[in-house]
Amino acid sequence: MWKPAGHRVIVRPDEAPDKIGSVFVPVWVKENKAFEIVQGEIIEIGMNAWKAFDDGKPWAKVGDRVMFAKYGGSIVEEGGVKYRILNDEDIICIWREE
């Protein structure tokens, strides 16, 4: 598994749907839509992520659901799963079930 350096965060983006209504989405369309997905789950957090903010403690943790900048970061693939490596500032918000 990738380990983010410095202020970076690894997010597993949600997958594009296989079906919209009753219409199946072709694979090539799903692959082209990869950059349009802006939600996912934090998988790893770099040791300096969010250190410049507030009390220096990360305000997000592994497992949190986040929204991130549409074209932020880099897409990498491992084991057939695509991930985004983002700067901490590309995370727009987090949400938790409360």
Image (cartoon, helix red, strand yellow):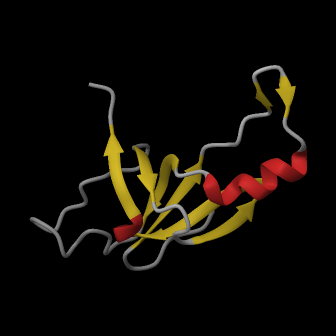
Q: Is residue 79 visible?
A: no
Identify the image quadrant of residue 32: bottom right
Quadrant including the N terminus: bottom right
Residue 58 appears in which quarter of the rendering?
Answer: bottom left
Q: Residue at x 34, y 70 (%)?
A: 89
Report which quarter residue 71 is drawn in.
bottom right
Q: Position of residue 48 (x, y in %)?
A: 31, 75
**In the foreground, 42 or 21:** 21
Q: Is residue 33 above or below residue 50?
A: above
- Report whether 34 appears left or right of 14: right
Q: Is residue 71 left or right of residue 92?
A: right
Residue 73 is left or right of residue 20, and the answer is left
Looking at the picture, how far across and down is residue 13, in whole percent? 59, 50
Residue 80, horizontal then vertical, whole percent: 80, 54
User: On screen, 32 above or below 53?
Assistant: above
Rendered position, 30 above or below 8: above
Identify the residue at horizontal 88%, vertical 52% (top origin).
Answer: 28
**Which residue is rendered at x = 26% and y = 68% of the image?**
50
Image spot of residue 74 (x, y percent): 61, 72
